[in-house]
Amino acid sequence: MAVAATALLLGPWSNDDLAEPGPGPAPTATGDPAGDGAGKPSPDAGRSTGTDPDDDGEDGTGGTDEDPGAGPSPSAASRPPSAGSWIAQLFSEPVSTGTATRDRRLAAVRAEVPEARYLRSDDYASLRPGYWVFYVPGPFEDGRAALRFCAEKGRTSGNECVGRYLSDDRGDADAICHPPAGSAKGRCTRS
């Protein structure tokens, strides 16, 4: 008799995912090739919601084609966060790991933070492209408010939560608020 077991470990994201912008792929620097924002539809058009599998062309059950009923179900709030808002970023996972891994990760995060969602970092210039970002949308007034939310959930380290500003401006890539909430470090306000 063969027994198979799978363990899902939530590991920290690399500090490189949160680094200051620099040459090459900055921590979330995306944008149109022209760099002028021309031809962009409304800020939320085409954004992955993190709650609706149809955004990624899946079967609509919240699962994957491999196991249609196994994934997280979509939530009632399926709108992505607007650019110009703070989120509590709980984890990030490379998009290259696939949607099945994304769905398992979301389920694991939701075990601790039921209101968690995901978004695709490519949809925001202030985020490094190529990641699923697991987050809570708030609304949060600033990065410190996001950290206070995380502290209430027992997520008090930088590997468990940061306040993150979502924007269509590459210049906001450094808007990352690091715990602890009482003496936060980094850029915790937009202005």
Image (tube, rainbow, N blue to C red):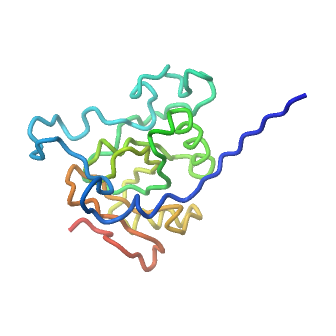
Q: Position of residue 163 (x, y in %)?
A: 40, 62
Depth order, front residue of 122/152: 122
Depth order, front residue of 45/101: 101
Q: Position of residue 47 (x, y in %)?
A: 31, 36
The part of the image, by quadrant, that contains residue 48 is top left
Q: Which residue shows up at 43% across the image and 80% down it?
A: 183
Q: Which residue shows up at 50% across the image and 19% down it?
A: 59
Farthest residue toward the bottom? Answer: 183
Quarter of the image with the N terminus is: top right
Q: Is residue 63 left or right of residue 182?
A: right
Q: Position of residue 126 (x, y in %)?
A: 28, 54
Farthest residue toward the right? Answer: 1
Relative height, residue 99 to residue 175 (above, below):
above
Quarter of the image with the C terminus is: bottom left
The part of the image, by quadrant, that contains residue 154 is bottom right
The part of the image, by quadrant, that contains residue 66 is top right
Q: Which residue shows up at 11% across the image and 42% down it?
A: 34
Farthest residue toward the front? Answer: 24
Relative height, residue 52 to residue 113 (above, below):
above
Q: Which residue shows up at 41% across the image and 28% down it?
A: 56
